[in-house]
Image (cartoon, helix red, strand yellow):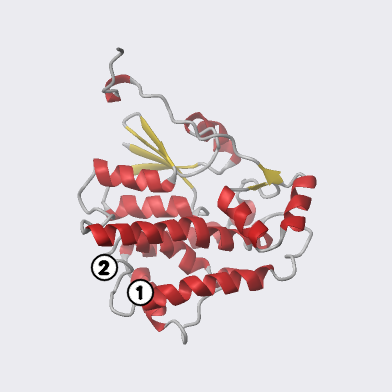
Amino acid sequence: MIKLYDSAFSPFARKVRMTLEYKALNYEVVDGLLKSNHAALKDVNGRIEVPVLVDDGIVVVNSSDIVAYLDYRYPSKTVYPDDPAARVHARAWERIADTFVDPILVDISYWKWAERSDKMPDGLIEAARADLRIVYDALNEELAERQFVSGPLSIADIALFPHMSSARGMGAEFSTLDHPNLARWLKDLRALPICAADLKRARAYVVNMKGVDIEKRRIFWRGDRIEWVLARGFHAWFFNEIKENRVAWPGPALPAPIRGNNSKLAPA
């Protein structure tokens, strides 16, 4: 049985879970962000970060690596397109979702759920809206002649969906008037069973978040999230976060050793 350490609060974990459901794979879930599960999560990922997938003793961390593994190990209903051009295109949009859209939306989310007594820095939401407008414009153009971003339903759509569906709640949504193709795409995805189930889980999590025992004071910062606030000129605010001990630094994501029958390696 596949085990997934995830959280309905993590767009990366949501991407993996939708991929599992698209492939109709059976799996069990552990909410790795619950403080009570940190020790178990640390056993499979020293960074104490979700998602992590464990499949027959094989440990895979990082959402993109997990999805690539799932497509290789379970090739039925692949999420990376067979056509080379479409595959490159879908992977590029997955990377945009992971390294550009995610940092923006996560960085402006802290005043929605974290334990904070300050207000959002002046200009932060405006910077977020301006940068996201670049993505919205590009996606609207991409979707002018296609139902999905890269042709068939792919990892591009699955990776983008958690972000696009949460942008309104962050106050940085796209304009349905200026981006009608993007609005149609999002409506179509919401009707898909895997996306409808994802939204249901995410909304239930947010509604009950006050009672969820996750870390809400010291923020876990990924490199892309740091880059965005620094690149947009909010370095003084970020350095004060460090000074106030509100930043959690992850350790290295060292690979799990190859063990048992999964190993094809022999000593020299």
Dot 1 alpha-carbon crowd within 10 angstroms: few under 14, some 14 to 19, many 20 or more: some
Say if 6 sits above or below 87 in the image: above
The residue sitting at 41% across, 24% down in the picture is: 257
Say if 170 sits above or below 261 in the image: below
Say if 110 sits above or below 167 in the image: above
How far across and how far down the image is residue 80, in percent?
Answer: 28, 55
Q: Which of disc 2 and disc 1 is earlier in sequence?
A: 1
Given the image, on which type of amino acid does mark 1 rest?
Glu
Give the Cα distance between marks 1 and 2.
Answer: 10 Å
Given the image, on which type of amino acid does mark 2 rest?
Gly
Which numbered marker is on residue 142? 1
Q: Residue furthest top?
A: 268
The residue sitting at 25% across, 40% down in the picture is: 73
Q: Are the residues at dot 1 and dot 2 in contact (C-beta closer than 8 Å)?
A: no
Work out which quarter of the rendered image holds the N terminus and state it.
top left
When asked about the image quadrant of residue 90, the answer is: bottom left
Nearer-the-camera pick, 19 or 240: 240
How far across and how far down the image is residue 207, in percent?
Answer: 57, 61
Residue 81 placement, left or right of 114: left
Work out which quarter of the rendered image holds the C terminus and state it.
top left
How far across and how far down the image is residue 29, in percent?
Answer: 42, 43
When asked about the image quadrant of residue 34, the answer is: top right
Residue carrying label 2: 151
How far across and how far down the image is residue 174, in percent?
Answer: 50, 77
Nearer-the-camera pick, 262 or 92: 92
Q: State whether residue 40 appears in this view.
A: yes
Nearer-the-camera pick, 53 or 79: 79
